Image: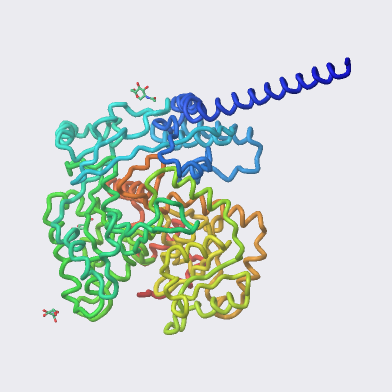
Amino acid sequence: MEKSTTFKWHNKIWFVVLVLSFGWLFLHYAYFTVNADDNIFIFLGHRFATTSNFHGSSHYRLPFNKDIHFAREEPQYDRPPVTNVNTLLPEKKDENVRDHVQSLDTMVNEKRHENGRGSFENVNTIEYEKKRANGIKKHRHRHRKVLPKKNHEVENVGMFRNVSKENHFSKDNNKVDLVGAKSTAKKHEGMKNGDIVTSKHPCAGRYIYVHEIPSRFNEDMLKNCASLNKWTNMCDFTSNLGLGPVIEDSTSVFLKRGWFKTSQFLLEVIFHNRMTQYKCLTKDSTIASAIYVPYYAGLDVSRYLWFSNASMKDADSLDLVKWLREKPEWRKMWGRDHFMVAGRITWDFRRIKRDSEDWGNQLLVLPETKNMTVLVIEKSPWANNDFAIPYPTYFHPSRVDQVFSWLRKMRKQKRPYLFCFAGAPRPGREDSIRGHLFNQCRIAEKKCKLLECQVREESKCHQPAYVMEVFQSSEFCLQPPGDSYTRRSIFDSILAGCIPVFFHPGSAYIQYLWHLPKDYTTYSVFISEKDVQDGKVSIEKILSEIPKAKVRYMRAEIIKLIPSIIYTDPRFRLDAVEDAFDVTIKRVLERVDKLRKGVDSSLRVKEELTWKHSLSGIVGEQKWDSFFVKKAG
Ligand SMILES: *[C@@H]1O[C@H](CO)[C@@H](O)[C@H](O)[C@H]1NC(C)=O
Ligand SMILES: *[C@@H]1O[C@H](CO)[C@@H](O)[C@H](O)[C@H]1NC(C)=O
Ligand SMILES: *[C@@H]1O[C@H](CO)[C@@H](O)[C@H](O)[C@H]1NC(C)=O
C-alpha cells in the first residue's frame, strides 16, 4: 500500500517538473520569437541610434517570409563597408577583444582631435567597428530607399546620417542640400559671395554641377543602341539604367538580389545614373566645386572603332569639346574643374596623328581634355589627364544587407582550387604569357582550374555564374595582361574573394590608386611576366609556398575591398556603403581642389613619368622601370 502511494507521489512530482519545464521553455520561446524581432531590436536600435552611424536602422523587418533564412544568417556587426576605415584598421581578428576596443577608442579620440569637424565618417565607422568587437549581435541595419526623380531632382533624405553626437554638421541639412529643386537653387544664390567657403554646410566644397549637354552626346546613343557596336547588340545591356538584365540564377553562386549581367562598356551610363544619387548636386554652376560632363565617350567611339575613317571617329568628340569650351563654366578654370567618364581603356582615345588609320579617336589628346580629369577603366602610365577607376562587376546591391551577406558568404567560401585562370590564349601576340599560364595550370592538375575561353568552353566564359563560381572556388586568380594591361576579370576576382596574381605592374598597381591599397603585397601576388616567359618559375610552387596565415590575411584584405570596387544600384541610395563611385568622387574633388589652389604637383612632373610620380611621388629610378620603357598602344 505505502509503496504504491509513494510511487504515485513520485509520478506526480515528475509530472509537475515536466509541466513546469515545458511551460518555462514555452515562455522563453514565446518571448524571443514574438518580442525579439520587435521590441528588443527596437530597444537596442534606439540605444545605438544615439551613438552610431546607423540610425534609421532601429530594427530589421523582414519583408518576405522567404527571406527569413537569408536575413537570419546576416552577420551582426560585420566589417564596416567603408574604405577609409579599412585603411585605418588592421585586421584585429585574433587579438583580444578588449585590446581591440581600447585601440579603437584611442583611434576615435585621435581622429576627433586631429580632424576637428571633418572626419566624422571615420569616427562613426570606428564606433561601429567597436560595437562589432564588443560582440553586439542583434542590431540590424535597414537602409533607406530613395527612388531617383527625373533631371537629377533627387530629394535629399538626410544628408548624413544624423545620428551621432560626433556629427558636427549643422542639422538643417535634413532638407535642402540637394539640389536640382528650384527652391534650393534660390537658396544657393544667397551663398554665392564666398560664404559657401566658410560655411559649415556639409556640401561645402562638394557641390557638383552636371552639364546639360545635348542629348546626342548621351541619351540618343542609348536610343540607337543597336548601332553602338558592330559585334554585340548593346541594347541587351542598357536595361536597368545600364546595369543590364537581372541575373536569374538558381544556383548558389550569387545572392538572390543585386546581380546583373553587366557589360564592362556601360560604365558611363551607370556612372551618370549613379550621379543622381549624389547628395550634393547643384543647378548653380557658380557654387560647384566640380563640373561633371555626362558624355558617353566610350559608346561614341565604339560605333567607329572598326571600319571608319579618322574624321568619323573624331566628329562627336570634337563637337563636344567645342561645346564645352564655349560655355561660361569653362573659362573659370579652363576646364580644370571638369570631369567625365570614358568607359573604355585609354588606348581607344589616344590616336596621335590627326589623319591616320590608327586605332581610336583623339579624345584624350585634345587640348581641352588635357585640362580635364577623365575617368577610364585603364589609364596610360605616361599621361596625367586620365585616372583609372574599377570596371563594373556583376554585383550592384540595392540594399546594405546584400553587401554584408556577400562579404560573409565570400569569407566562408570553400576554395578547393589553389589557383585558376579564365581567359583566352593570345596566339597572335608573341609577348603574351597566356600560353605559359595554360601550361602551368595543366601541369598543376587538380590544384588549378582552367577556364579556356576560345576553345571548348567559349560560352561558359560569358556566363557570369560560371566565371564567378570558378573564382569563388579558388584561392588565387591569375590576371595576366591581355590585349592591354588590365582586365575586367581583376574586379570579378576581387568580388569573389579570390586573391589576384599579377604579372605586370600596369595591370593594377599603377592604375587603381584611388581604390586599391598602395602596398600591393597586402592584397595580391606579383610574379614578373619575364620570369614566366623564361620558364624560370613554377606558379604552383610560388603560390603553395605562401604561408596559410598570409593567404588568410590577403583574402581578408581583398574582401574588405569589395564595397569600394562595386557600383551600387543607381536606383537606390546606400548611405552606409562607400562604393567605387563615392571613392571616385571624393578623389576627383580632392584633385580639382588642389588644381584650384595650384598645389597639384602631378602637373609639374614630366608627363611620361606620371606613373612613377603617382605611385611614390618620386621620379627617380624604380624597380619597375623596365616594364614601362616603351609606349604601348
Ligand atoms: C537629429 O537631429 C535633430 C536636430 O538636431 C535632433 O533633435 C535629433 O535628436 C537627431 N536625431 C538623432 C537620432 O540623433
Ligand atoms: C569618311 O567616311 C565618311 C563616311 O563614309 C565619308 O563621308 C567621308 O568623306 C570620309 N572622309 C574622309 C576624309 O575620307
Ligand atoms: C588649359 O589650361 C591652360 C591653363 O592651365 C590654359 O592656358 C589653356 O588655354 C587651357 N586649354 C584650353 C583648351 O582651354
- Is 192 situated left or right of 395 in this image? left
Question: Residue 264's x, y, as percent?
Answer: 35, 63
- What residue sits 62% from the left and 43% below the top? 93
Name the residue furthest front.
1
Question: Residue 10's x, y, as percent?
Answer: 80, 20
Reply above or below: 469 against 312.
above
Reply above or below: 287 against 567.
above
| Color scheme of the displayed model | rainbow
Q: Is residue 447 or residue 5 the one in the foreground?
A: 5
Which quadrant would residue 573 be assigned to in this image? top left
Answer yes or no: is residue 84 visible: no
Reply above or below: 334 against 474.
above
- Is 95 situated left or right of 594 in this image? right
Answer yes or no: is residue 142 visible: yes
Question: Residue 574's x, y, as percent?
Answer: 37, 42
Tally the marks: 0
- Is 279 situated left or right of 576 in this image? left
Q: Is residue 604 or residue 247 the one in the foreground?
A: 247
Which quadrant would residue 158 be assigned to in this image? top left
Q: Is residue 629 or residue 52 the one in the foreground?
A: 52
Indicate the quadrant containing the N terminus: top left, top right, bottom left or bottom right.
top right
Determine the quadrant in which ligand 2 lies.
Answer: bottom left
- What residue sits 51% from the left and 66% below the top? 502
Q: Is residue 5 or residue 289 the one in the foreground?
A: 5
- What residue sits 29% from the left and 44% below the top? 277
Indicate the quadrant containing the C terminus: top left, top right, bottom left or bottom right.
bottom left
Question: Residue 415's x, y, as percent?
Answer: 59, 60
Reply above or below: 540 against 509.
below
